[in-house]
Image (cartoon, rainbow, N blue to C red):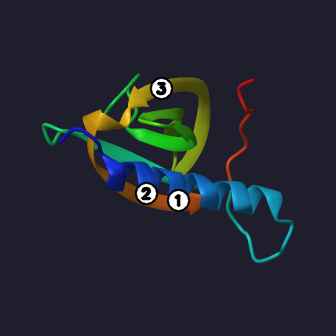
């Protein structure tokens, strides 16, 4: 598979939902992050620095910038670490939860 349009489109959609939630002060928005897990082409869960939980920060062409999240006592927290990966390496996305996350945007 040369291009991964379905994965790219889903990641763009998740990012759009998150950005709209952040930029909209409506009381109906009770989250700013959709926690996801990613599966590699070989079917294994993507795990980096002992976590498999991520927040989509940006997607550009076939690259996705992710914020690493940790799960501590039932709550997700930012690890303040970012990675950029090729979406060509991803075969599936699992949406875990919609949450409020305090994080800093990398400049």
Residue beneath the point at 73% across and 70% down: 29
* Mark 3 vs 2, N-terminal side: 2
Q: Are marks 1 and 2 in contact (CB under 8 Å)?
A: yes
Q: Position of residue 87 (x, y in %)?
A: 36, 37
Residue beneath the point at 84% across and 73% down: 26
Q: Are marks 3 and 2 in contact (CB under 8 Å)?
A: no
Q: Answer above or below: position of 57 versus 28.
A: above
- Label 2: which secondary element: helix
Which quadrant holds the C terminus? top right
* Mark 3 vs 1, N-terminal side: 1
Q: Answer above or below: position of 65 versus 22.
A: above
Q: CA distance from mark 3 to mark 1?
A: 18 Å
Pick whichever, 70 or 16, lies toward us.
Answer: 16
Q: Crowding near pointer 2: few (<14 within 10 Å), some, many (20+)?
A: few
Q: Answer above or below: position of 34 versus 53.
A: below
- Residue ID for mark 1: 13
- Residue ID for mark 3: 84
- Label 3: which secondary element: strand
Q: Position of residue 85 (x, y in %)?
A: 41, 28
**From this viewpoint, which residue is outermost toward the right?**
25
Pick whichever, 27 or 51, lies toward us.
Answer: 27
Quadrant position of residue 6:
bottom left
Which quadrant holds the N terminus? top left
Left-right relation of 105 to 10:
right
Pick whichever, 39 or 75, lies toward us.
Answer: 39
Q: Position of residue 104 (x, y in %)?
A: 74, 33
Q: Position of residue 64 (x, y in %)?
A: 47, 35
- Residue ID for mark 2: 10
């Amino acid at each position: 598979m040369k291009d991964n349009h379905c994965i790219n489109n889903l990641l763009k959609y998740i990012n759009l939902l998150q950005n709209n939630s952040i930029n909209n002060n409506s009381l109906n928005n009770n989250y700013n992050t959709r926690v996801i897990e990613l599966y590699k082409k070989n079917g294994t869960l993507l795990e980096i620095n002992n976590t498999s939980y991520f927040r989509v920060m940006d997607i550009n062409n076939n690259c996705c910038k992710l914020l690493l999240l940790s799960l501590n006592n039932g709550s997700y927290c930012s690890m303040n670490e970012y990675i950029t990966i090729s979406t060509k390496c991803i075969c599936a996305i699992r949406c875990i939860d919609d949450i409020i996350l305090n994080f800093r945007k990398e400049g």
